[in-house]
Amino acid sequence: MKIPVLGIACTKFGELWHQSLSDLLAQAEYEALADAHLVPQDIEMIVTANMGASVWSGQGHLGAVSSDILGIDVPAVRIEAACGSGGAALAAGVMAIMSGAARTVMICGVEKMTDVDPAQITAGLMNACLRDGDAFSGASFVSLFALVSQQYFLQYGIGREQLAKVSVKNHTHALNNPLAHLHKKITIEDVLRSPMIADPLSLLDCSPISDGAACIILGAPGSAAQGVNLIASAQATDTMSLAARPTLTSFAATRKAAKLAYAQAGITPENINVAEVHDAFTMAELIALEDLGFCAPGTAGYTNLTIPVNLSGGLKAKGHPIGATGVAQAVEMVKYLRASSVNCVGLTHNMGGIGTTVAVHIFEKRSLGV
Amino acid sequence: MKIPVLGIACTKFGELWHQSLSDLLAQAEYEALADAHLVPQDIEMIVTANMGASVWSGQGHLGAVSSDILGIDVPAVRIEAACGSGGAALAAGVMAIMSGAARTVMICGVEKMTDVDPAQITAGLMNACLRDGDAFSGASFVSLFALVSQQYFLQYGIGREQLAKVSVKNHTHALNNPLAHLHKKITIEDVLRSPMIADPLSLLDCSPISDGAACIILGAPGSAAQGVNLIASAQATDTMSLAARPTLTSFAATRKAAKLAYAQAGITPENINVAEVHDAFTMAELIALEDLGFCAPGTAGYTNLTIPVNLSGGLKAKGHPIGATGVAQAVEMVKYLRASSVNCVGLTHNMGGIGTTVAVHIFEKRSLGV
């Protein structure tokens, strides 16, 4: 496939108490239209990613909210796949294009979290896990990822320092992203000394709770594009419960979605020049790098990758307004590729639950005359 | 389009306190597989419709829950479009098929409502409306539909008796549907004497709060089918707020989706032999019949339609477990068409919000040798 990216936009991520859920969505939608030089009436379908607004903002029906903002009457739905909602919405947009149902599709993502009681955020996040299973045990999301981290430490002999490096790197990258939630240069010592949340994950191993929205507009194959095409879109699903998995230190859904995406694009991991991966926790970035084939299992904490990862700051420092995250990864990737003066291939990896839902997308920039 | 329906299933609708959300979903999924003579590994994608489980059951991520139940690792997402979630999920399944992304797609719908505090149900239903708009005014869903009904009464001079006839008809139909929530023969007098909820809508003008799940499996064009094909799938969207509409007595999204669906199928309303329409309130059925082109505006309360409508009992008497409703309409339609001994064309009409999101699907049965 070769689907042109017509427009992109992302709001500032952060504590945006002066903007409502609808305000954020409207900003992202209209900025993406402006970027694409389109008007609302050009959009033939809308897919909006959101996880928790029904619980946290008293607002469902977000597909229709998105079309209402533009004043148009086209098909509009909400996709939810926990923290992987954005990637799943992007994949739904691709299917709408490839089916011929729509020639120009807007994919939005939004979440409003910082004005909600944090206990409701923690409880609401567990909607991503099986209520009759892992959630019933009283686990929180970070405690489940702590289990994964402990197992990884045992299996591969790394320690908190290797995780801390991920956080330091992504915080450094965020300094260059004006839209990032956190603009704070940190050291490994800062991470190690930050309050322990769920051993071995400390505060600075965890992505923040953020507000934000993002939007991307896809066109039909062959329509005008600003040089960047989406060339692969793949999803896979693993068990809801960690207890049902043969291993905790690698996520089968990432491996499967990556394999499908590489096959669609006709490339291998070695052809990827840049990546945005789902670092909701530092541990998640290391596992993603291995599952995506960028380095061997157990080595991500020590390997010096030759490609940049999470230049946006990642979920860790750019922020993680859940529904927006997967769409924002694509937006950041397109920004990077547009700015590249050479041929360039970038991958985005978005995850819902503890490795349960994964979407992998690959974007390509071909320079003129090449 | 001509997409074969491979399998269908619907659980009993009602107060199913002995079955959890997952139990209901599992029953519908496995019964649909059995009906299709398929095994879980034949399914290449899952789309699950649900409106309120994040709020009412502490369970999101329902695409992955559905794939987890089958033990498969294929793409799986949840679609939400308020009470129109099921129809929107069916349309998403059609796009997955038409895009070539999957050859066999399972569409599920589920809701669990009867074990929830009714105040939470009423509040959660308002997530379908704009939180900054109609919901902010303190309106409930039934009160908004009462406004529509009052306006219709004023404009067309009908009274509560014409609404009551719809309820009596659908309750009568439900007596023949063993899966229906309400098996109670009622009279026009019963409706008129039932407690007033929001004038002019009384208790027996309103669909009940129900638990239930439904499932339909679509195949790629050309694959084996039990004689019923999906021949049109269309969606449209109207404003979130009633205050933004030029009229309250007709829903533009129904008119647009119907027009698109008829065009796709190459037919007119006169070619439809049977319909399941979204009668969340009795008033909604009359408006739907007019907007779908079965009778002229303002006449549905008096017209003697020549086609049967809501033979299943409709939302009014079959029940309205929200996420399941749109899928169940399709299931009931396929059941009816399968049983038909002659060529037959059926339409399903599913609505989210007060006419905000509408999906119209058309199914066709061609008898052997015709």
Image (spheres, coloured by chain):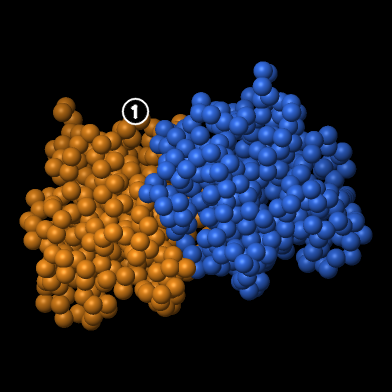
Chain colours: A blue, B orange
Given residues B76 and B341, the one toward you in this image is: B76
Given residues A209 and A64, the one toward you in this image is: A64
Quarter of the figure that contains the C terminus of chain A? top right
Percent from the top left, x then y, of residue B177? 22, 59
Q: Please, which chain is the residue tagged with disc 1 on?
A: B
Q: Mark 1 packing: few (<14 Cα in 10 Å), some, or many (20+)?
A: few
Q: Secondary structure at mark 1?
A: loop
Tell me the residue at 16%/75% (across/down).
Answer: B191
Question: On screen, A243 above or below A277?
Answer: below
Q: Confirm whether residue B291 shows in the render.
A: yes
Rendered image quadrant of residue A146: bottom right
Q: Confirm whether residue A326 shows in the render.
A: no
Tell me the residue at 12%/62% (across/down).
Answer: B301
Tell me the residue at 50%/44% (across/down).
Answer: A106
User: Residue at label 1?
Assistant: B222
Quarter of the figure that contains the N terminus of chain A? top right
Percent from the top left, x then y, of residue A185? 86, 56
Percent from the top left, x then y, of residue A96? 45, 38
